[in-house]
Amino acid sequence: MGDHCIREVRGYYASVLLIDCYNVLHLPMPPVLAGLDEHGLCVAISRSAFRKQTATVVCDGRPKPLAPSCSPVDSVELAYAGISQSADDLIISIMNGHNAPRRITLVTNDNAIKKVARVRRCKTMSSEKFIDRLAGSLDSPVGIPHPSAKPDLSPVPADQVAGWLEEFGLSAEELAADPIYRELLALTEKPVERKQEQSGDVKGETPTEKVEGKPLALPKGKSKIKRSERCKNRKPRKSPLKTVDLENILSADIEEQLKKFWPPPGL
């Protein structure tokens, strides 16, 4: 993918926009570009003032699992550097191999790449300025999928699987022997329909033997005693409080004083 991008860029003498993808995406985004990823960046460029330029978006590593490896629009190139080099190395290779480097505008905040761009007489633009111009010149929404949208569960291409195995130093046999991989693989299989076990709770049947861990069902004609009936048959409990003799509590003097006010007139 990266070599293809280099051949394409070398053949053009028009204005070229060379973008350090992750250097741009790691910056805070305005609301109109919130949630932007590599493919969304390609779409946004094709709908902005930069669409008149030949744009190449350079990314580190390989495409993410279950994600397409090419740009969703024909007017913008999407190049992955792979595992043998970094995105900076690929960008420098593009600038060094271009026939008209002065027509290249490099978008990055990386000082090392900008130093090479100055040597090659390439123009530079900061990532912040690029984001501002991109957001201010969009002629239509980017259409970034909502996070709750269903992911693409189509099979991963065999070349991508081989690339990830090579990157992590695994073989197909080691992956198949991994217990976690087998467990995840089992989750993707259709669940086996379990037959309902024959039990005594089927209508018209009465259990004759006791099932372990389960009480026997009541015979026909007998029902559970209602709670209200159990309350009626319950014997009243004795109150723990003893009866208080109010006559013995009050002293004679206090009793005489109370008789002056009680009972009140009219009773």
Image (cartoon, rainbow, N blue to C red):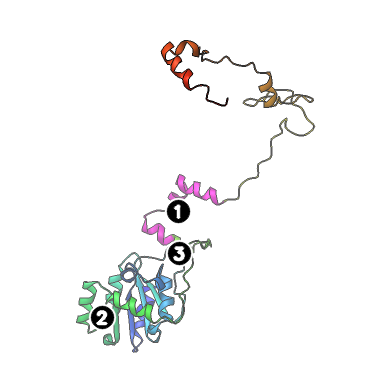
Depth check: give the residue in front, 10 or 222: 222
Disc 2 element:
strand
Q: Quadrant of the N terminus?
A: bottom left
Give the amino acid type for the residue marked by disc 2 in the picture: Thr
Distance (Cα) linking label 3 and label 2: 35 Å
Which residue is labeled 3 in the image?
A: 159
Left/right of residue 154 with respect to residue 170 in the rendered view: right
Q: Is residue 170 magenta?
A: yes
State the extent of the magenta-drawn residues as a range: 162-188
Depth check: give the residue in front, 244 or 19: 244
Q: Quadrant of residue 167?
A: bottom left
Which residue is labeled 1 in the image?
A: 172
Which residue is labeled 2 in the image?
A: 124
Q: Earlier in the sequence, mark 1 or mark 3?
A: 3
Q: Residue at x 69, y 35 (%)?
A: 197
Q: Position of residue 231 (x, y in %)?
A: 66, 22
Is residue 189 positioned above or below 242 on the image?
below
3 vs 2, front mark: 2
Distance (Cα) linking label 1 and label 3: 13 Å
Q: Quadrant of residue 50?
A: bottom left
Left/right of residue 265 with respect to residue 5 in the rendered view: right
Give the amino acid type for the residue marked by disc 1 in the picture: Ala
Distance (Cα) linking label 2 and label 1: 44 Å
Depth check: give the residue in front, 24 or 61: 24
For disc 3, the neighbor class at 10 Å (few under 14, some 14 to 19, many from 20) is few
Q: Residue at x 42, y 53 (%)?
A: 171
Q: Earlier in the sequence, mark 3 or mark 2?
A: 2
Disc 3 element:
helix
